Amino acid sequence: MTDAPDAGPLVFLIAGENSGDLLGANLMRALKDQADETMNFAGVGGPEMSQAGLTSIFPMQDLAVMGVFEILPRLPLLLKRINETANEVERLNPSVLVTIDAPDFCFRVIKKLKSRGVNIPTVHYVAPSVWAWRPGRAKKVAQFLDHLLCLLPFEPPYFEKEGLAATFVGHPVVETSFAGVDGEAFRRHHHISPEAPLLCVLPGSRSGEVERMMGVFGETIAMLAPQFLGLRVVIPTVAHVEDRVRALSAAWSVPVVVVKGDEKAAAFRASTAALATSGTVALELAMAERPNIIAYRFNALTHKIAKVLVKTPYANLINIILGREAVPEFVQDVCTAENLSRELARLLGDEAARTAQLAAAHEALKHLGLNGPAPGSAAAKVVLNLIKKEKRP
């Protein structure tokens, strides 16, 4: 239970996974910078939001689950957390409720509060991908949200036509800075030769993703090793899956270095190319100017449902924005060691291919707000305006 706040607005935030945790942290810092009074925070978040001043009411990892089949075994815990969160919001009566991504959880909390007659201004950060699947969700979320913060420039009109205020604030990846990150020092520290081809492998931050992806990634490495003598692998990971990542990579055919989050940026800069599970990390690699390929495998049941619902031809946001496959991606049936190793061999061995991909990625990043206002600051402006509006008589 969170203590009652000091004088000043209370912002209750809910984040359900690592990418949302970073969004929340940037928003919290920007709110403190822009506000002319003390800002107070409560809610659910991870290490980034904790560092920014939030004490989470329970571990954020309880919510880090994806896919129909994966959710079912954890449904009792998720229902318990929904109730706990709604109860805490009602008790604290914050100035504004900011939910960040994780719509399956966050929207249930909001609906539960509405059903109790609790009327707190509600902002959701990260628009549902109505342009990719289930376009009818735009009308539905407009019924219980007050404002939507969008990461993509083409998203606001989908919601504005349903009467929901929506603001493009930019994608948080453009706030990622690799200035001063020393890849050469990383190699020296981990005893990796400057000439050695180094592949950065990113199996995901959810336990289900790690279990599904590490096998095919290991097979891919085995096929690449004879082609690239001295090949090394680095795997940046997060605490709650680190032990499993180490166990699953222990028998790989090349030397593997597993590093924690604080070394991720240096690992990116030290690498020649990357093999990544589809997600926000693909954009981080683009910011780090590291060519990559994207892979993903769903649980079989989740994939069957996705095939019916998903309308976009691409998984990687770089490709979605550009309308073409600038970054190779391999999902489900085509996510094989043969396909992955073929494309990685091209990137590892062809500088022109690496350069072409990075140029395309840079063009996509400009559409996401690169060189514009910081997304966290733009989001904070919207939240503060909503708080001020509620204060007016």
Image: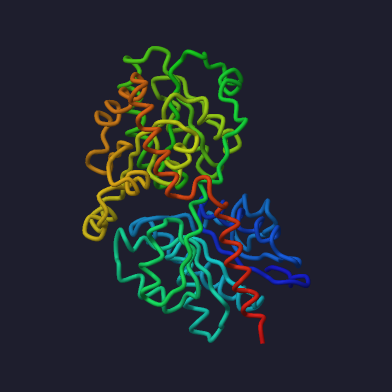
Percent from the top left, x then y, of residue 301? 26, 55
Q: Quadrant for residue 381, please give it.
A: bottom right
Percent from the top left, x then y, of residue 163? 41, 77
Quarter of the picture containing the N terminus is bottom right
Q: Residue at x 29, y 31 (%)?
A: 340
- Name the residue nearer the viewer: 110 or 26: 26
Q: Is residue 33 above or below residue 211?
A: below
Q: Residue at x 56, y 16 (%)?
A: 191
Percent from the top left, x then y, of residue 198? 45, 22
Q: Is residue 287 above or below residue 120?
A: above
Observer able to see residue 77:
no
Percent from the top left, x then y, of residue 187? 56, 20
Quarter of the picture containing the C terminus is bottom right
What colouring does the structure picture have?
A: rainbow
Q: Quadrant for residue 8, please give it.
A: bottom right
Q: Residue at x 30, y 22 (%)?
A: 223
Q: Residue at x 30, y 71 (%)?
A: 136
- Name the residue nearer the viewer: 154 or 288: 154
What is the total number of numbered labels drawn onto the structure image? 0
- Name the residue nearer the viewer: 149 or 136: 149
Q: Is residue 192 above or below residue 78?
A: above
Q: Quadrant for residue 197, please give it.
A: top left
Observer able to see residue 141:
yes
Work out which residue is located at the far right of the displayed protein and give it. 7
Q: Is 202 on the left-hand or right-hand side of 332?
A: right
